[in-house]
Image (cartoon, rainbow, N blue to C red):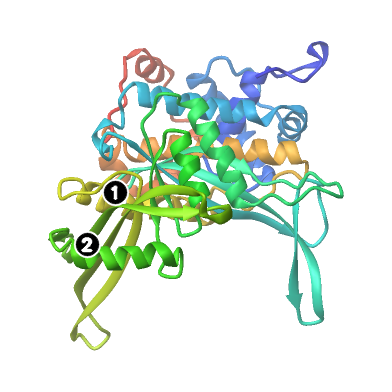
Amino acid sequence: MPDPRNPKKTKHCLTVLMLYGVLFCVLRMASRREGNREMTRPQFLENLRLWFPEIDELPHQDTLARVLEKSHPEGIEGALLGLVDQLIRQKKFARYLVQNCYPIAVDGTQKLTRDALISPEWLTRTVRTADGTEEQHYVYVLEANLVFFNGMTIPVLSEFLTYAGGEESKQDCEQRAFGRVVERLRRAFPRLPILLLLDGLYPNGPMMELCRTNRCQFMMVLPEESLPSLWEDFRGLRQLLKENVLEMTWKGRRQRFTWVNGIGYRYGKNDKQCQTAHVVVCDESWAECDEAGNEITKTARHAWISSEPLNRKNLHERCNLGARYRWGIEESLQTEKHHGYQYEHCFSQNWNAMRAYHYLMRIGHLINVLVWYSSALSRGLRELGIRGFLDFVRASLAAPWMDPQVVQASLARPRQLRLV
């Protein structure tokens, strides 16, 4: 990542600035002001030097913000992708694969809204108010996360939707941004077997074609109101393929799977284009207690389009361990928004700096996820919780009880990350 500053006028090297930014997000500081207040304490700096000897002095948050304004935020996200790639190469997630594929969920979410236009890249929409209608400006991000059936969710990359301006230009949309996400995933991991887990926005011919062109498998949620011709073919063929039924119990739920392979879905001008879809429907029921303590039976139906043919051997893995855990990215986004990572906080009104802080936050979240699922810390974390553990770390860094000899001995010992 190139340093945008004049080397004759720099006081802090770029590595220290980025380390400071990542630590700011790992410790889940609520604002730049809080970071300045908590991280500039004399004892905090002394303790931090024990773990990171290259730190001579911690910068001010305004210094970090000015550097991020002139930097290339993609370089920070490149560090995130490099860390994920290193973990994959070390086979840290090998136990959690779905049919030997890495399950990646993609979902869009709103980051910021303002009444005034802060930057020309922001999107614009018309909203209804009590006085009529007015324009609202907002930032929207398409996120991609590794989601595993043990609950672990790993941030991978973020794609900001932008508005370039001009008379003939159009505002960005989630499906257009999804095309860029898939291409970026394939460039970052050219040989990685990927299983994309997608919600009900994506089941259509162009999206299926895009995934297959980039050599990605997929499991797409198929809503009842989407693709009526595909549903009609499925219901008709299901009556003929009575052997395509599987009943099982999973996590206390009685499930009944029915599936049809090889349905041709036509789309495009005059239906000249065609994609092969494999459709599965899961009807399930389970018992719960109502407010009066009476046992009631609840039911639900789930439907997906699969890129690969379905059979009795792969249904459980692709549906229950893959597609059903798409919720992991939604839970991860809620954590980033409401549990200390300040996803919806701007940190800077500059477009470059705002995105850079976003990528630093994602790196900080990834580090905390690895800490949470580390076998070496699992017992203490289960007792304290992630918030209690981070409070303990912050209090320890600000207190005078760290022994330099113990820290040096700890750094000298070889370590290996083992996930539970």
Q: Is residue 132 above or below residue 354?
A: below
Q: Is residue 147 left or right of residue 320?
A: right
Q: Is residue 197 left or right of residue 293?
A: right
Q: Is residue 40 above or below residue 331?
A: above
Q: At x 26% / y 49%, what residue is drawn?
A: 321
Quadrant where the N terminus is found in the figure: top right
The x, y position of residue 187, in whole percent, is 52, 26
Q: Which mark is residue 60?
A: none
Which residue is nearer to you in this view: 194 or 265?
Answer: 265
Q: At x 32% / y 48%, what residue is drawn?
A: 151
Task: Tell me whether the residue at label 2 lies in contact with that at label 1, contact meaning CB atoms closer than 8 angstroms.
Answer: no
Q: At x 32% / y 14%, what residue is drawn?
A: 413
The x, y position of residue 265, in whole percent, is 42, 54
Quadrant where the C terminus is found in the figure: top left
Type of residue at label 1?
Glu
Please rate how many residues cluster around mark 2, counting C-alpha atoms within 10 Å: few if below 14, some from 14 to 19, many from 20. many
Q: At x 24% / y 88%, what residue is drawn?
A: 292
Which residue is nearer to you in this view: 82 or 55?
Answer: 82
The x, y position of residue 359, in whole percent, is 59, 36
Name the residue beneath numbered marker 2.
258
Tag 2, which secondary structure?
strand
Q: CA distance from mark 2 to mark 1?
A: 43 Å
Residue 405 appears in which quarter of the rendering?
top left
Q: Residue furthest right?
A: 167
Name the residue beneath numbered marker 1.
383
Q: Is residue 391 above or below residue 406?
A: below
Which residue is nearer to you in this view: 400 or 104?
Answer: 104
Tag 1, which secondary structure?
helix
Please rate how many residues cluster around mark 1, counting C-alpha atoms within 10 Å: few if below 14, some from 14 to 19, many from 20. few
Type of residue at label 2?
Thr
Residue 216 appears in which quarter of the rendering?
top left
Between discs 2 and 1, the one toward the N terminus: 2
